[in-house]
Amino acid sequence: MAKVLFINPVVRQEDVPRHVPYGIALLASIVMNKGHLVQIYDQNAWRKGPEVLKQVLLADDWDVVALGGITTAYGAIKAIVKDARAYAPKATIVLGGGVLTSLPSEMMEFMPEVDVGVIGEAFVTFPEMLAMLDAGARNFSKIDGTISRGPEGKLLFGAPRGLIHDLDNLPYPAWDLFPLEEVYFKNSQVLFSEEGMLARRRLDVNMSYGCSLICRYCYHLGIAGDMRYVEKDGKTTVEFDKPGTYTRDIRYHSPEYVVRLVKHMFDKYAIDFIGFLDENLMTMDKYSGRTWMKEICRLWLEAGLQPTCIRDGVEHSEQCRGVHWSGTSHATLSNPEILKTMRQAGCSHLVYGYESFSPHVMKTVGKGATPETNMRSFFNTLSVGIRPIPNQIIGFPIEDFASLYQNMEAWKTLGIVVKPFFATPYPGSEWFAVYRDRIEEQYDGDLEKYILDLGDATKITAVISHNFNAVELLGLRELMIAFDYKRIREYEKYWRHAHGIPEGAPSTIFVDPTKPKPAAAAAGGGKRRLELL
């Protein structure tokens, strides 16, 4: 049996560690059930620096060092694999997660220390790798869902890995291997609701994989059936959503599994709050015919998980017993009936990706919502006692002054102020595929520089807006949240003059990135063509 060291890289260095890495916890449980020996070094939780990582790597004769994470953890991952090769030279280094799946060939080139990568879901692929190593073999390209190194360093792809569909066969995550008491429970507070602010023992779960929506800024990385293997110039590449090519495979745990899992967590760890990590709870509820969430809530009450403050109709306090929870929602799919049911089961807040309150911008996003549905969902959610948490983005491709004003007017109507994220074309998203050349141009043609620069969209990285540059977006966002109409209008006059757009004309410069450049522009000369929308 293999000795496996999982390493969870640092993510969001600017914040405290808040979330047990669900994927690693699941994989650890799966391979332990097959008899393998597992240890986990949670670098994100401990944050002890390279000297402690060195000690961990030297602590045993590891057969496998396995790690993964989201693309924004790339900098930490790159440093870890270098140390792993130096201090555990005999170990097979395995990389998975979104960082690898989004750009498998590029990541294997950026990190030559990695022996094999897992593309897409690892639930079946990783145990098969360990079985192969136990048998003394290393021909990983025979395993579906892999990318590995062949003769002379040639990258070899295994066949695409199919998705598992009976999610209820997955074991419970191995939470015991993580520093719950020492780190994670101390950072339980979720500052989006009263119940979340008073949470003392929070853990997170994932009830579904993927999402039915086609939001062009979002990525699924194969877990929603959106991944395709394509042959180009004699090489295999992986593609995700591109204009006109959308596929979705909807999967979710049964309500019975969900509630059994939470009851297990309540009994074993005395949790008082659950964060559902799902991309969008309401899309799953809609896909099930409006039975899934209702049944989860019914079983929640039946299992005795309903918070006592809701049961007794009193204000929430530290004396409350039971499990409050939060998740994600969608403006067009939530309705008063299901929201009321969710509140009775303990839902404290729902995150809504409103993105924008501008009609013309929302039509380009692919989410299917409108300013009216955004508004309605906000007040419907608030009316049942659930806090709606609005997320917004600026810097969309056709963001313009009109959309900025429309967002500000919506905030006034709702009585809120939202500090928007910046539209960020993460690898694996449709807009990354569409704007890749433009992204690389902003980083001197070096894609790795862009990957290293990526954060959680609170700072600006590659700009995909056709109207505004990075400096303009940063400044306009600050003026928006101050409701400084005067200075925005003053700058709009300057901007229109600079671009030759008269007062009263639509303030959008748009060049379709999916179409060939005009001959003059392609040759580097002549005036850039502007299409006014």
Image (cartoon, helix red, strand yellow):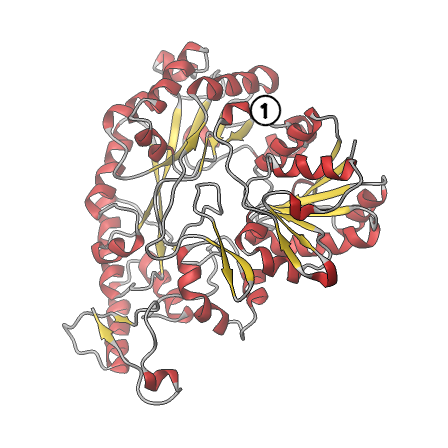
- Viewer-nearest residue: 216 or 370: 216
Residue at (61%, 17%) from the top-left corner?
A: 268
- Viewer-nearest residue: 444 or 244: 244
**Is residue 268 shown to the viewer in this render?**
yes
Q: Is residue 174 left or right of residue 257?
A: right
Residue at (49%, 47%) from the top-left corner?
A: 221
Q: Quadrant of the N terminus?
A: top right
Q: Is residue 65 left or right of residue 68?
A: right
Residue at (75%, 30%) from the top-left corner?
A: 36
**Is residue 198 shown to the viewer in this render?**
no
In the rendering, at what x and y percent does residue 2 appear? Answer: 78, 34
> Residue 39, relative to residue 358: is it above or below?
above
Mark 1 neighbour class, 10 Å CA radius: few under 14, some 14 to 19, many 20 or more:
some
Q: Is residue 320 left or right of residue 406?
A: right
> Residue 187, relative to residue 416: is it above or below?
above
Number of marks present in the image shown: 1
To which residue does mark 1 refer?
172
> Residue 495, relative to residue 113: is it above or below?
below
